[in-house]
Amino acid sequence: MSLITNRKATFNYEIITTYTAGIELFGFEVKSLKQSHGSLEGSHVTVRGNEAFLVGTFIPPYQENNTPDDYDPYRNRRLLLNKTEIHDLEKAESTKGLTIVPLSVYNKGTKIKVDIAIVKGKKKFDKRETLKKRESDRDIARDLRK
């Protein structure tokens, strides 16, 4: 079950490869995510020193009064990946035109997981094609229901 999703990612980017990663969170951030609070809009993944970090993700505190005073909801969160995956992400990050974005945050048992993808930005005409395809699929589904 997906807790939060990045719905603009599939519209703005062409997905090349996807990975699943664990994420390092505080307890009150986990509770907040399980209530589906948070946003992946505008966030991305960077690789620094053989570690991957999720940058720009907004996760509000579960209870405002019980959180530390210095808590930053936009803080960088470490992703838990193996060495080969980090190496692949590092290579993709250094390639011009490729970006790494999170697609969704979900729970698998008691763990919180993040789906991340290596993506390439779509041009304006590609986005128009996506809208046309979505509209035609909707029309076909509407006709089949009648």
Image (tube, rainbow, N blue to C red):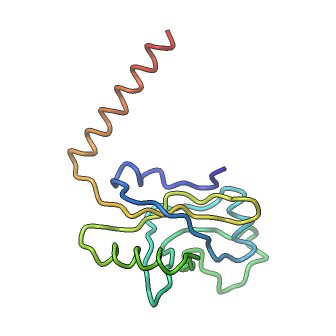
Q: Is residue 73 above or below residue 140?
A: below
Residue 42, x across and y down, in percent: 43, 65
Q: How many marks?
A: 0
Residue at far bottom of view: 49
Residue at far top of view: 146
In the foreground, 79 or 3: 79
Q: Is residue 29 above or below residue 104?
A: below
Q: Please report the residue visible at 67 percent of the width from the left and 65 percent of the height from the top.
A: 112
Residue 20, x across and y down, in percent: 55, 64
Q: Is residue 1 left or right of residue 97?
A: right
Residue 94, x across and y down, in percent: 30, 78
Q: Is residue 89 left or right of residue 1?
A: left
In the foreground, 104 or 51: 51
Residue 71, x across and y down, in percent: 65, 82
Q: Is residue 80 above or below residue 13?
A: below
Q: Is residue 49 left or right of residue 66?
A: left
Q: Give the quadrant of residue 88.
A: bottom left
Residue at far right of view: 66
In the foreground, 57 or 20: 20
Q: Give the quadrant of residue 4.
A: bottom right
Q: Please report the residue visible at 48 percent of the width from the left and 75 percent of the height from the top.
A: 55
Residue at far front of view: 84
Q: Is residue 128 above or below residue 97?
A: above
Q: Please report the residue visible at 74 percent of the width from the left and 78 percent of the height from the top.
A: 67
